[in-house]
């Protein structure tokens, strides 16, 4: 595995939680369907498709917000699964329609695998920094 690093760690700070929320049906029902919360599916979609990545074509984000080719591949699978559900229920459907769609378990499964890989890669990167003698990430006081 080649870790290409990430040029925009701030992007990743948005991407990883968005992927994790897609991997958690409990979170989705308890947070997204609660109108008093700030996060909903629309927010997650904007993070992954518009603002900090392009889940339809994530290769351009390798080294920006995605660390490895495996992350790119898994993000593309997640993007395809999300797009399939959107095509089935309609882009303007409420969050609950997405969560109840027959293809939604594919989204959750793809997100769970990607979350596992992204978190593992982040922990490996931190461990490598520590082993190299960095008490803090380079460039921090």
Image (cartoon, rainbow, N blue to C red):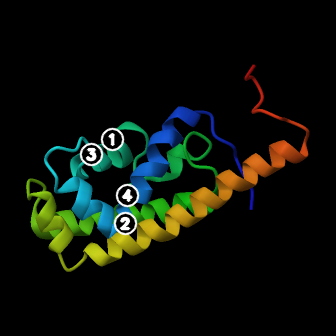
Query: How much space separates mark 1 and mark 4, taking CA atoms?
Result: 17 Å
Q: Is residue 121 left or right of residue 133?
A: left
Query: How much space separates mark 1 and mark 3, taking CA atoms?
Result: 16 Å
| Disc on the earlier residue, 1 or 4 | 4
Q: Which mark is residue 24?
A: 2
In depth, the one of 108 and 61 nearer the eye is 108
Q: Which residue is mark 1?
A: 50
Q: Quadrant of the N terminus?
A: bottom right
Residue 91: x and y in percent read: 13, 55
| Badge 2 vs badge 3, beta-carbon distance below 8 Å | no
Element under disc 4: helix
Query: How much space separates mark 2 and mark 1, taking CA atoms?
Result: 21 Å
Q: Is residue 94 left or right of residue 61?
A: left
In the rendered image, the vertical position of residue 106 relative to residue 79, given as above or below: below
| Disc on the earlier residue, 2 or 3 | 2
| Disc on the earlier residue, 3 or 4 | 4
Query: How much space separates mark 2 and mark 3, taking CA atoms?
Result: 13 Å
Query: How much space separates mark 2 and mark 4, taking CA atoms?
Result: 5 Å
| Badge 3 vs badge 4, beta-carbon distance below 8 Å | yes
Element under disc 3: loop
Q: Is residue 20 left or right of residue 101?
A: right
Residue 29: x and y in percent read: 23, 63
In depth, the one of 4 and 14 nearer the eye is 14
Q: Which residue is mark 4?
A: 21
Q: Quadrant of the C terminus?
A: top right
What residue is at 31 percent from the left and 77 percent from the top? 105
What residue is at 85 percent from the left and 35 percent from the top? 134
Q: Which mark is residue 39?
A: 3
Query: How much space separates mark 3 and mark 4, taking CA atoms?
Result: 10 Å
| Quadrant of res 83 | bottom left
In depth, the one of 124 and 106 nearer the eye is 124
């Amino acid at each position: 595995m080649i870790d290409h690093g990430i040029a925009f760690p701030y992007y990743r700070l948005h991407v990883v939680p968005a992927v994790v929320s897609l991997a958690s049906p409990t979170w989705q029902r308890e947070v997204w369907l609660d109108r008093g919360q700030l996060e909903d599916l629309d927010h997650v979609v904007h993070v992954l498709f518009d603002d900090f990545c392009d889940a339809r074509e994530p290769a351009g984000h390798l080294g920006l917000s995605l660390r490895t080719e495996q992350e790119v591949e898994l993000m593309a699978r997640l993007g395809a699964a999300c797009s399939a559900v959107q095509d089935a229920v309609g882009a303007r459907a409420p969050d609950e329609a997405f969560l109840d769609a027959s293809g939604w378990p594919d989204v959750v499964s793809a997100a769970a695998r990607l979350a596992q890989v992204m978190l593992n890669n982040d922990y490996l990167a931190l461990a490598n920094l520590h082993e190299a003698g960095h008490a803090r990430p380079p460039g921090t006081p």
